[in-house]
Amino acid sequence: MNPVSGSRNRRARNLRLAQALDEQVAGLTVQRTSGPGDASRLAAQAAAAGAASVWVAGGDGTINEALQGLVGTSTTLVPLPAGTANVLCREIGLSMDPFAAIPRLLRGNTRPVTVGEVTWNRYMGGNTKRFFLLMAGAGLDAEICQSVPSGLKRYLGATAFMLTGAVCAVRYPYPGITLSTQTPPTGSVPATAPTPDAPLVIIANSRNYGGPFRLAPEAGLEQPGLCSVALSARGPVALLRLAWAVLRGTHTRLKGVTLGVGERFELSSPHQVPFHVDGEPVGYLPAVIRAIPDGVLLRYPVPVGAPSGVDAIATVPASQA
């Protein structure tokens, strides 16, 4: 957990959350981060020491940091919603109340899930790699993630992204992105070549995007591949039309929206195009993204209304969890 992130109310809540966890989770050790990279280091140390699970109280960015230290280990990642959008927690059907989430996670089930891996060249000094559970995006949404002021994000939450997005929609030059896709094994859903000059490309491991919005309906954490979403909308008016369609769930039928499925993707552009990983800006194209099936163990919550003492998650299909 990060004891100093967010507003004063959120910081106070996180301290109460640490106390609640200490009372309910046997053998718990609370580790407080103090700067970027701490969550990755602490999670890796916990896994190396043989911890059964690492509980992460934070937003998708903090969870992504912890993920870096847990991929390929036998330690389970347990997410607690204590951030802005909490996309991962929504994806697995978890309550947005972290206190209510604790008992549901304690009674839940651990499953191996697919992890996305992004590789790119940084500072001309060799390849850099980062994992993600939700999505990697290049273009306008990465520009928004990169431009939103940290103070505004801390105090306004999702509203900060909306305000910054409105400004970026007007000022962003919308350079084209070329996407090359390697299709999944025979028998899987075939990939469709996206628009080669789309100004916004998202490689999704989760259905949800930006909170409760279903951007990639074919995606799923337990699917072996990843989904590509290429959006050709340019300018504020086209983006508003696209946003309205996403809210209604009809965007997949729009001209200029192209979906695909694959195991490996290459994104490039002749221009300087930023990209983000789970909402955190990390670099610029070109980049290679690939799926790692069963890359990390993830705790799913027991369904709402399940009888006390029953591990009912085992009877629920993954798509409904």
Image (cartoon, rainbow, N blue to C red):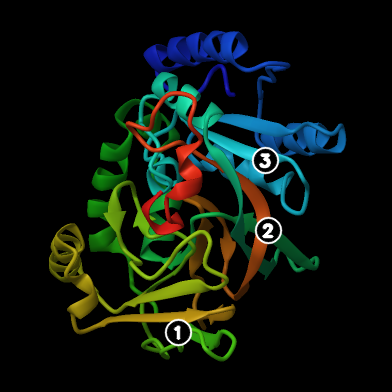
Looking at the rendering, which quadrant does residue 21 occupy? top right
Q: Indicate the position of residue 305 as horizontal and vertical percent values.
A: 32, 31
Q: CA distance from mark 2 to mark 1?
A: 21 Å
Residue linked to disc 2: 295
Q: Name the spot of residue 141 as percent of width and height, x first.
A: 38, 59
Q: In x, y percent, where is residue 51? A: 78, 31
Q: Quadrant of residue 231?
A: bottom left
Q: Earlier in the sequence, mark 2 or mark 1?
A: 1
Residue type at tag 1:
Val
Q: Residue at x 37, y 40 (%)?
A: 85
The 10 Å Cα crowd at callout 2, few under 14, some 14 to 19, many 20 or more, is: many
Q: Which quarter of the figure has residue 209?
A: bottom left
Identify the secondary structure beneath mark 3.
strand
Q: Is residue 26 left or right of residue 278?
A: right
- Looking at numbered disc 3 in the image, what kind of residue is underneath it? Thr
Q: Quadrant of the N terminus?
A: top right
The answer to whether marks 2 and 1 mark residues whose Cβ atoms lie closer than 8 Å is no
Q: Is residue 89 left or right of residue 257?
A: right
Work out whether 21 lies above or below 192.
above
The residue that appears at 44% across and 13% down in the rendered structure is 13
